[in-house]
Amino acid sequence: MLKIITKKIRFFLPYLGISGLYFSLFFIVIFLFHFYINDASLQGALNPFYYFLRWDSIHYLEIALGESQASVFFPLYPLLIWIFSMFFSPVSSGFIISFFSLAIALYYLDRLIKRDFNKKISHHSLLLLLFFPSAIFLPLIYTEALFLAILTSFFYYLGEKKWLIAIILAFFATITRNVGIFLWPIFLISFYLQLNVHPLGYVKKNLNILLRKKYFWLSFFIPLGLILYCFYNYLILGDFFAFINYQKNWSDTHVFKWPWQTIKEMFNIIFHLGVNKIGTFNYFRIIFVEFGSFILLFISNIYWLIKKHWPYTLFCLLNLITFSTIFPMASVNRYVVVIFPIFIFLAQISKKQDWLFYFILSVSYIFFFFNIFIFSSGGWVA
């Protein structure tokens, strides 16, 4: 038993090393940028780690310390910060959670891709993920690294047909982010496809087979996390869907529109408003960063549909529908960083053309460090 544990730890160490190097690179670049930006909004902060406390990070810490209620923010991440704060400072706890979460995410993503594809695709996918422009949120006190760790481990165990572990992980996903509920239909379709079912025309027979399986019924444990959180919202705030309704007060960009309305409005910005109306930077951010991320997800969705990889197809599609109801697609570039099938797709289409892979990676590098620069100067990234 001890030998098995030692072997697993030894196998996991390289991913801890990669996570450590990644965090070190990120922190060093932030400090360097911050040092040379004289008008940076955080200039003169006594604790250098406060450079990294921005936007949602502060709210997660406030929730963990009991200074505010979790309405928009789901509870798992602040709960973990609260637990770790028994041994470390709250700020250190947040970074420790993100550090280990990133290592776990890399570990499972590497194993998953090597199992389904090959080593080259795996290495390329990991690089594209780590230097994706909005990957700057992975080392911060944000849910990105934690949610990515849950997602990659869920899909890994789903492929291994370890249904109970996948169910438990999906439950944790539903109390990490609202889109965690997407893992329930993904679990059901994956579980259904591995059954010895009749052709699709035999709906009644197929349902009878499915209803006799215990893991079908156990899968109802997955949405329980979201249901419990809704009840928490009702007890504390008097609103079952406070995490949705409070978004209206959180930002004027969180406006619901039907997908076709959102697409129409985006094209209106591109062809009618233009740079003169909304400014060069905002035009670039909305069109190339936010809408560009949406288009990348859309193309990835088509790719996995053609490949008939139904779990990835459904995962991309559900996120695609969600993003298409948000106008003007604020923070889409941040949300897609955890949709790892995108990076497998990019690695796949460039596997025979190394120049294409390095071109994609180079473009990602440029925007990655540009986002770090914006972050260092106190600007809004996503």
Image (cartoon, rainbow, N blue to C red):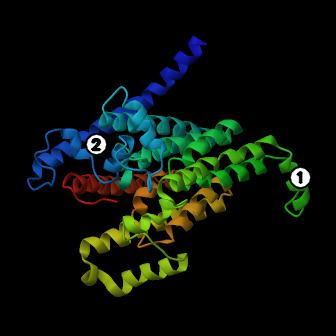
Q: Amino acid at mark 2?
A: Phe
Q: Residue furthest bottom?
A: 272
Spatial separation of the CA atoms under disc 1 and disc 2: 53 Å
- Is 280 rendered above or below residue 320? below
Q: Which residue is mark 2?
A: 26
Q: Residue furthest left?
A: 38
Q: Which residue is painted at 44% across and 36% down in the image?
A: 80
Q: Which residue is painted at 56% across and 54% down in the image?
A: 230
Q: Is residue 293 left or right of residue 313?
A: left
Of the residues tagged 1 and 2, which is closer to the observer? Answer: 1
Q: Is residue 78 left or right of residue 122?
A: left
Q: Which residue is painted at 42% across and 78% down in the image?
A: 266
Q: Which residue is painted at 38% across and 35% down in the image?
A: 99
- Label count reads 2
Q: Is residue 339 left or right of residue 186?
A: left
The residue nearer to you, when weighing 162 against 300, is: 162
What kind of element bears circle 1?
helix
The residue nearer to you, when weighing 39 against 201, is: 39
Quarter of the image containing the C terminus?
A: bottom left
- Is 44 rendered above or below residue 84? below
Q: Is residue 16 left or right of residue 1?
A: left
Q: Which residue is mark 1?
A: 208
One can see residue 117 in this view: no
- Is 300 rendered above or below residue 152? below
What kind of element bears circle 2?
helix
Residue 125, given in percent of the width and then of the height, sits at 48, 47
Binning the other alpha carbons within 10 Å of mark 1 as few (below 14), some (14 to 19) or many (20 upward) gives: few
One can see residue 66 in this view: yes
Q: Amino acid at mark 1?
A: Asn
Q: Are marks 1 and 2 in contact (CB under 8 Å)?
A: no
- Label located before the other in sequence (1 or 2): 2
Residue 91, given in percent of the width and then of the height, sits at 30, 37
